[in-house]
Image (cartoon, coloured by chain):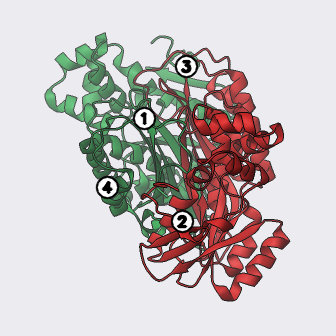
Chain colours: A green, B red
Amino acid sequence: MVENGGQIKVAEPETDMTLSEDDLIATLFAPLAGPGGHGLKDDAATVGVDPGDELVVTVDALVAGVHFFVDDPANLVGLKALAANLSDLAAKAAQPSGFLLTLALPIGTPEAWLKAFAAGLAETASAHGCPLLGGDTVRTPGPLTLSITAFGTVAQGAMLPRTGARSGDRLYVSGTIGDAALGLALRLGHDGLGAALATGLDPAAQAHLRQRYLCPEPRLPLGPALRACAHAGMDVSDGFVGDLRKLLRVSGAGGLVDLDRIPLSTAAEHAVALHHDAFRTAVTGGDDYELLVSVPPETADRFERLAAAAGVRVTTIGEVTADPGHVTFTRAGQAVPFATGSFQHF
Amino acid sequence: MVENGGQIKVAEPETDMTLSEDDLIATLFAPLAGPGGHGLKDDAATVGVDPGDELVVTVDALVAGVHFFVDDPANLVGLKALAANLSDLAAKAAQPSGFLLTLALPIGTPEAWLKAFAAGLAETASAHGCPLLGGDTVRTPGPLTLSITAFGTVAQGAMLPRTGARSGDRLYVSGTIGDAALGLALRLGHDGLGAALATGLDPAAQAHLRQRYLCPEPRLPLGPALRACAHAGMDVSDGFVGDLRKLLRVSGAGGLVDLDRIPLSTAAEHAVALHHDAFRTAVTGGDDYELLVSVPPETADRFERLAAAAGVRVTTIGEVTADPGHVTFTRAGQAVPFATGSFQHF
């Protein structure tokens, strides 16, 4: 089903790719196919679901120059595109089972780019047991655009919802927050923060932040802890502050968050010490791909034990309150006012 | 999960849409959501699969100006985008259960366009019991680009494959072939064929062909006939000749096709009488969204009875032979040579 779209073409741009559509599928993508992909030779793929389970599905679209840099290493574009979807599955306590890929390719997409992209996808797919099942490849006069639909399984009715946060729950985040946003600031390098980090941070810290921007690690090992202990979860991909607000809003709850407890990497701590915008960027910038989890107090200890057993750091950063729409953030004991989507000031 | 992509934006184009992303989802798309869509408020959707069934998944990407005309009525763009995916499910003998939508929207996409697009989607989704489950909405500096992932169910192992055609099978097509390609020629109007059709066909015939290009009818009612009687199937979307070759190639078989038996609508028959290119266009042009089915002789009668009971015309147009790679097309008893993908001459 990775074919040319099942459509007559209104206009077919010329291409200087040396691989034909069929070659591209056969040489680059068929090797990634799992059993349900039927060698990418059919109109459709199959996804088996064990009795008592149901499927969790999620999709992301990415546009070159909007969601990633045109000159990002192609293997990391592939890695991150799939990892971002796997992060959504992780947040839903689902076990990955496969993915579909659509690629809209501009004129002149180099074969080397596609090979590296496929290699990055393959690495991520293999690391997480999530094979390619099919897709669609088309031409576009615009920028390279891709979408990934990822499938996972959960026991029937056991998808961890966004809407389940309850007053009194503890709020946890996995890993550390803000590295990716600071890595992006370094990558962009055109504002005061980016320049300060580029000159003030040691090379290892810079490399850490850049790596975290390019190579998110889906928190799939937290699955057992989430399934056993959590009320609600989502992945933090659009910025911690905004994403927390979303989770609480759809849960009909409020929250109290101690920003001093936000887990930062050593590199991010150095960044915060270097520049007054770094903390704001860390907690409002995107691309963390960490999990935000609401856990009732009675299972909090068990949640922490299971997370530790899974090798994933989790940190409690606040609690859920009964006051819908009111989320209070404090730093050094002071309330920090925010605009809807981002900090007003610190 | 219809949200802004879970990604920090490298660059965010300005927009003059009056609807925000959240408004767009809440007002236009949430009304289309089925139970597994969780009101489009979560990171992911759920798809239930009954015990003994498995899921069939298919995805298509469409680019404005490549796969549809920028000035096509937006409701029909929505209708056709979903119908094309439903046609893939129909070809696999699957029962639709829901779909995901990604939309990459250029600067200045009018709210009215989006409303009409959503209305067309809604109409098709409702007609075929295939609710929206989720998606993703992003901005693009390029043309409007969308992808639809559609889900259906079949009994475990019962997806009708492309690869199952066997020597001695009868080859059937549903409906009539070529209307959409002739409708597109009319729409383009810039070659001899388009001009001849525009002047030589009566208005009702022109309207029929244009309608068939814009509004494909997924042959889902054929499901019971396919499940009970067929060896292989695919949908004819890239042109009958090329698609038949594909099915026979992946089945490791050959074929003998009598082009005089290709079912044509009255409008297409008039077109064939009018212009020497019309028949070639009809059997090699795309967008039919009819089904091509390989049926063993022993179930052929039953297949025809079940198809008649479903109200779908089916026509046997040839048979499968044991000679892999050799597909012979005849017209008026003469072999018609073809290039790989299209007619060399008639």
Side (left or right) of B3 relative to B12: right
Type of residue at label 4?
Leu
**Residue A324 seen:** no
Type of residue at label 3?
Ile
| Residue under numbered circle 3 | B107
Seen at 50% across and 71% down, the residue is B328
Q: Is mark 2 on a helix, strand or loop?
A: helix
Using the image, tell me which numbered label, if any, was put on residue B270. none
Pointer 3 and pointer 2 on the same chain: yes
Type of residue at label 2?
Leu
What's the chain of the residue with tag 4?
A: A
Decide: is B27 above or below B306: above
State which tag comes first along the sequence, 1 or 4.
1
| Residue under numbered circle 2 | B244
| Residue under numbered circle 1 | A13
Front residue of this view, candidates A2 and A196: A2
Seen at 61% across and 48% down, the residue is B276
Give the tally of numbered discs.
Answer: 4
What's the chain of the residue with tag 3?
A: B
Foreground tag (3 vs 2) = 2
Q: Report which quarter residue A272 is drawn in.
A: top left
